[in-house]
Amino acid sequence: MRDSMLWLSVAIIALTTAALRFLPFLIWSGARRTPALIERLGRVLPYAIMGMLVVYCLKDISFTAAGDFVPAFVACAVVVLLHVLRRNTLISIIGGTLCYMVLVQLVF
Amino acid sequence: MRKIWKTALIATVPVMTGYLVLGFGFGIVLRSGGHSILTALAMSVFIYAGSMQYAALGLFAAGASPLTVFFTTVMVNARHLFYGISMLDRYKNTGKYKPYLIFALTDETYSLVCHDTPDIAETDRTRYWFLVSLFNHIYWVTGSLLGAVIGSLVRFNSEGIDFALTALFVCVFVEQWMHTKRHAPALIGLGVTAGCLLLFGQDQFLIPAMLVVAVLLCLMRGEEHNA
């Protein structure tokens, strides 16, 4: 890719991403009242989004071999378990990540 | 003020781990594609969207047209519309910080600012959100720069360390789950997205998933209203 094309692409990506981030604030801002439906949607969305993000992070796993999905699922279970037991974000994340690294590097 | 700095720093440690590693990886791959350190810096400062920056590498290699670049960005990043909608209220009165808070609203920043922070006073919340956003941005840029500059020298088996970000989202998911008795939204997010992934495949599932989730959540709201 030529240099000018590269920088054009970078600019397009940057502006499009920013536009997606700003759009809701531009549509429903300031004086105009946010419609009740959007307001309520905004309140329940965080719960749904975290579910989406978890799946999004796991989108590349496949089920052809145990090594492709067991580490991710086991490590997720470890995070859930640690978090329910200790409720300390750092412990849960470090525990889950170490577990995942050991599984992908040494076991599978 | 000192306390807010500390709280924000501690809250962002998980993101720091993930961003340094993923940013580092991005810097390495970008350089190995023949691009400059300046490109890495500019992309991480101005685009600041991890998964899209990785996707961009493929677009550059393929010499994609501006239109393809635009549509790919919309496909990959449409989920940011949801973050905006759910932060409308929280970010309403953030004054001069607002543009930056919105610009820097990545997946990971969102996961840190979308829930209540009881140990932060109401008046300090804007500054806290700003610091969380800024710290995360700095981690990402630092990781990318390090990867671009010294990436080829490092020999450390970090395979799997990027799981830190997945773990962060799982944590927030569990935390939210324990905070509420109404689990339908969480289950809809998880179930619909997984279903769409199986149905549409890993490149095209996000937008259908977003649409179905939005429609279901709106319908559910109606039910609650009638009850």
Image: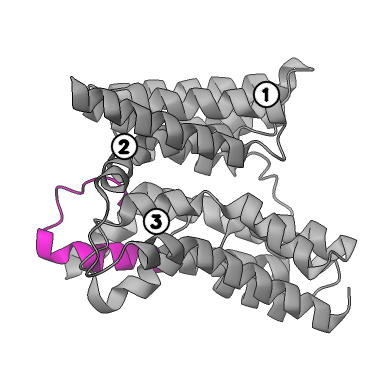
Relative to B123, is B155 on the left or the right? right
**Three-letter code, disc 3:** Gly
Which chain is disc 1 placed on?
B
In the rendered image, which quarter contains the N terminus of chain B?
Answer: bottom left
Asked if residue A101 is among those painted magenta in the image, a careful observer would answer no
Bin the neighbour count of mark 2 within 10 Å (Cα to Cα): few under 14, some 14-19, many 20 and up: some
CA–CA distance between discs 2 and 1?
A: 24 Å
* Quadrant (top left, top right, bottom left, bottom right) of the C terminus of chain B: top left
Q: Are marks 2 and 3 on the same chain?
A: no
Give neighbour class at mark 3: few <14, some 14-19, many 20+ (Cα, 10 Å): many
The residue stretch that appears in magenta: B113-134
The reply to whether label 1 and label 3 mark residues of one chain is yes
Give the chain letter at badge 2. A
Give the vertical position of A104 relative to A41 (above or below).
Answer: above
In space, the residues marked 1 and 3 are separated at their CA atoms by 27 Å
Q: Residue at x 63, y 51 (%)?
A: B76
**Image coordinates for residue B196, horizontal then vertical, percent:** 62, 28
Q: Which mark is residue B213?
A: none
Image coordinates for residue B174, horizontal then vertical, percent: 35, 28
* Foreground of the two, B38 or B142: B38
Q: Is residue B152 visible?
A: no
Question: In the rendered structure, which amino acid carries the disc numbered 1?
Answer: Leu
- First in residue order: circle 1 vs circle 3: 3
Q: Which residue is mark 1?
A: B198
